[in-house]
């Protein structure tokens, strides 16, 4: 089994700036330390977008500083709050879409760029022909392997009117390719949500910082609540993918064996 650590929506701000009274940089640093302590055997870390809150170079440099001593490979993706120019200036890489393939044993992870620089609402995602062609080619090359697609925006509704209004606008194009991969991992919504859509298994992970309230009537896209921060642990198993989520801001609890639940002889 290979473990991959997944963070999303870390929303790094400039020093002194907070979101609903929380310091995103401090929360991410806390989550990263927790993940590295408990899952030092992980193969890599993927951060699936909204690396920063405003996309400024100062914010990207602050993130780079936090990651400077990380002993694991870190792979960065973009979300709706990110800005390509600032990201590339600080982290380098070819300009354009930030998407890539990672292989671990019999598993392939396809990290797909859903950020739309020209979104009419500033926050929804979109998959242009270039990105869909890339995805089709990667799925074709990975035939016979266990394929997981990771992206920032979900392609489908989750029941929150506000967030559903800023999903991937042409999400059907991704769902239509669902028979070519086994698991979809998203962020964006700031809530742990798992299910099955059009025959495709999906999991959404929440932020290390601020979360979306469980409100099925809210039409706002920025409603936030201070609930425990979390990160995901993907377990790449011989025959599939298992998705765990770890709340790291809860008080430490001792592990106690419940003798009453054990097997008696």
Image: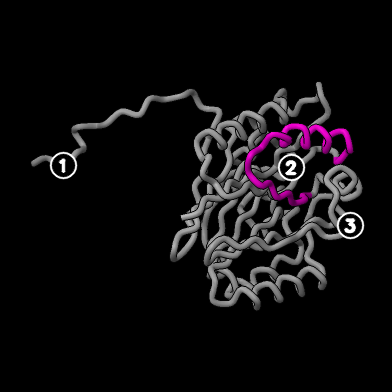
Residue 192 counted in the magenta span? no
Q: Position of residue 134 (x, y in %)?
A: 75, 71
Q: Residue at 65%, 74% (x, y): give it.
A: 139
Q: Which numbered mark, 3 or 2, is in the foreground of this view?
A: 3
Q: Residues within 10 Å of mark 3 (few under 14, many from 20)?
A: few
- Marks 3 and 2 sit apart, C-alpha to C-alpha, by 32 Å
- As helix, strand or loop, the secondary structure at mark 3 comes to loop
Q: Is residue 217 at all visible to an observer of this figure? A: no
- Marks 1 and 3 sit apart, C-alpha to C-alpha, by 59 Å
Q: Residue at 16%, 42% (x, y): give it.
A: 263
Labelled pair 1, 2 in contact (Cβ < 8 Å): no
> To which residue does mark 2 refer?
220
Q: Quadrant of residue 127?
A: bottom right
Q: Earlier in the sequence, mark 1 or mark 3?
A: 3
Q: Earlier in the sequence, mark 1 or mark 2?
A: 2
Q: Quadrant of residue 64?
A: top right
Q: Residues within 10 Å of mark 2 (few under 14, many from 20)?
A: few
- As helix, strand or loop, the secondary structure at mark 2 comes to loop
- As helix, strand or loop, the secondary structure at mark 1 comes to loop
Q: Which numbered mark, 1 or 2, is in the foreground of this view?
A: 1
> To which residue does mark 3 refer?
95
Point out the image quarter for the C terminus: top left
User: Which stretch is magenta?
Assistant: 55-79
Residue 263: which disc?
Answer: 1
Q: Residue at 56%, 32% (x, y): give it.
A: 34
Q: Position of residue 165 (x, y in %)?
A: 74, 54
Toward the viewer: 210 or 56?
A: 56
């Amino acid at each position: 089994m290979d473990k991959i650590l997944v963070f999303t929506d870390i929303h790094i701000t400039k020093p002194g700036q907070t979101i609903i009274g929380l310091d995103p940089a401090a929360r991410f640093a806390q989550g990263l330390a927790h993940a590295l302590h408990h899952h030092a055997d992980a193969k890599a870390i993927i951060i699936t977008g909204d690396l920063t809150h405003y996309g400024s170079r100062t914010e990207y440099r602050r993130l780079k500083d936090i990651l400077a001593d990380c002993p694991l490979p870190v792979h960065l993706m973009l979300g709706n709050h990110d800005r390509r120019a600032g990201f590339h200036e600080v982290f380098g890489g070819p300009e354009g879409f930030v998407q890539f393939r990672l292989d671990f044993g019999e598993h392939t992870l396809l990290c797909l760029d859903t950020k739309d620089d020209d979104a009419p609402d500033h926050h929804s995602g979109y998959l242009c022909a270039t990105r869909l062609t890339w995805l089709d080619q990667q799925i074709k090359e990975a035939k016979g392997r266990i394929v997981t697609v990771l992206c920032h925006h979900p392609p489908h509704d989750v029941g929150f009117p506000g967030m559903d209004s800023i999903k991937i606008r042409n999400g059907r194009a991704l769902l239509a390719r669902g028979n070519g991969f086994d698991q979809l991992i998203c962020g964006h919504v700031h809530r742990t949500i798992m299910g099955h859509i059009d025959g495709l298994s999906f999991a959404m992970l929440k932020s290390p910082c601020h979360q979306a309230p469980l409100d099925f009537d809210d039409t706002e896209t920025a409603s936030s609540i201070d609930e425990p921060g979390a990160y995901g642990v993907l377990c790449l198993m011989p025959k599939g993918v298992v998705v765990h989520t770890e709340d790291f801001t809860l008080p430490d609890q001792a592990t106690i064996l419940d003798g009453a639940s054990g097997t008696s002889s």
